[in-house]
Amino acid sequence: MNQNIRVRFAPSPTGPLHIGGLRTALFNYLIARKNRGVFILRIEDTDQTRYVEGAEDYIMEALDWCGLTPDEGPRQGGGFGPYKQSERKSQYKRYAMQLLESDFAYYAFDTPEELDGMRKSFEARGETFVYDARVRESLKNSLSMQSIEVEEMIASGTPYVIRFRFESNQEIVMQDLVRGEVVVNTSTLDDKILFKSDGMPTYHLANVVDDNLMAISHVIRGEEWLPSLPLHVALYRAFGWEHLMPKFAHLPLILKPTGKGKLSKRDGEKGGFPVFPLEWKDPVSGEISPGYREEGYLPEACINMLALLGWNPGTEQELFSLDELIKEFQLKKVGRSGSRFDPEKILWFNHQHMQLMVDDELIPAFQSVLKANGVNIDDSRLESLVPIIKPRIDFLHEMWEESWFFFQSPDNYDPGVVKKRWKEDTPEKMEQLAEALEHCEPFTTESVEACVKELITSKEWGMGAILNAWRLLLVGAAKGPGLFDLAAFLGRDEVINRMKAGIKEINR
Ligand code: GLU
């Protein structure tokens, strides 16, 4: 493996993995595989108030389902572990101290009530309170207080936070692989909290420290993290790690199917489509959110759809396997503008990927659908059936609906079809057709077709009328695949039995 390319997917286990998060994981995975690099899963669980039971397992299961299994992670282990930030807790303080010593950070003792009061008085003047160079000297922190006082407060256990100290009015110039050069003036930034006296780092400190310790080469994440980039770059510089700084790529947002804004869980509820890869049961409310897996989608279809949200291959090609994506994917072909989520498109991808599955792969799935419906049949019998059923389905669970008539005779006849297709002389014609089939040799698709057509031509009957009525007798409705295939599969006796039973039943 190429240890120079090390990428990480770093979700916080605050709930089920949204498909936007899955896309971030996918793009990281593709970059790792393309460069024979390392794909790392790091669980960012420092904010314990937001920890959700089961979310971590859900994330790993979703990655596995999609075939995006990490090379290093909580389950896989690796030389840079542990891969859960809560298990790395003891190391962060030392980095916060380093920043305090080098004056890049300071202690702040302002209570939440005091900060709230400040916010309100600023608002009353029509201004916004920002903890920054303009106000920090007038607040309760180690920049405004005597050091002896600071030491005493810490010694007596007064709660504190450690804040990053941005220089005022400096331009931070950053490079992003998707957005190019990004420039932000520090006067627009606040002195973010890095560490709290409960011993926990915030996301920013833990994230930058771990990316450094895990030798991450590329940070590929959602655009919502772009506002954090100036702080992260400033942290790399403050630690003296600028030469080791990873390359950054911020992926465009996934937008709602219609209207403005980011795709949300509510959009899925409103539009009746999942926004999660797997079904999720909320551990507190018990509420169930649907998942693509449970709705019968193939992981290949999910991956394909997600890849094209933000990445443009630059060709007309839309169908990609994971291997093809690895070959074609390039960060420089990821666009800046948000991509609209189209719930219809995944249905199309699912149908297409279903067709790409080799027939043999479908046999076990078909068998389980049949077993669930009480049908026992040899694999060898199914071989001829799979190519007939496959083009007719978007989902595996549709297999029964599209194939039951191969295994069971109809127990009713669609009245609408009877009315339309069953004429005075139809029973007589069907009797003659049954008679012809009695002598049709051999009973294969081709020869049945020849026998039926010969009869129709010699009698000068209408082809459509006969085939429609025949279908009604064999299937009970105006649906199903090619009749000659169906007849050959059923065999002569079953075909004739169904015809006789149908004629009797419809004429009652
Ligand atoms: N823990 C952050 C998240 O939940 C990670 C952001 C990043 O990749 O830096 O998305």
Image (cartoon, rainbow, N blue to C red):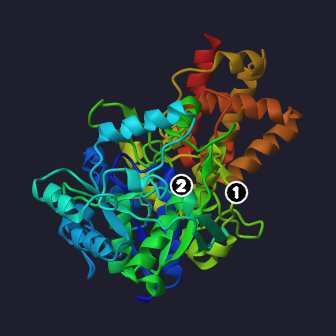
Where is residue 309, by image quadrant?
Answer: bottom right
Asked if the residue at label 2 sits under 8 Å from ligand 1, the reply is yes
Element under disc 1: loop
Read off the residue under disc 2.
Answer: 224
Percent of width and height locating residue 274: 50, 41
Q: Going 45% across and 60% down the picture, which residue do you hit?
A: 380
Q: Is residue 277 visible?
A: yes
What is the crowding at mark 1: few (fewer than 14 residues within 10 Å), some, or many (at least 20)? few
Q: Quadrant of ligand 1?
A: bottom left
**Quadrant position of the N terminus in the picture:** bottom left
Q: Amino acid at mark 2?
A: Glu
Residue 242 numbered tag: none
Percent of width and height locating residue 182: 64, 68
Question: Of callouts 2 and 1, which one flags the residue occurring earlier in the amino acid sequence?
Answer: 2
Read off the residue under disc 1.
Answer: 337
Q: Going 70% across and 70% down the picture, which residue do you hit?
A: 313
Where is residue 442, by image quadrant?
Answer: bottom right
What is the crowding at mark 2: few (fewer than 14 residues within 10 Å), some, or many (at least 20)? few
Q: Is residue 475 above or below residue 24?
A: above
Tag nearer the camera, 2 or 1: 2
**Pick the front one: 93 or 40:** 93
Q: Is residue 439 visible?
A: no
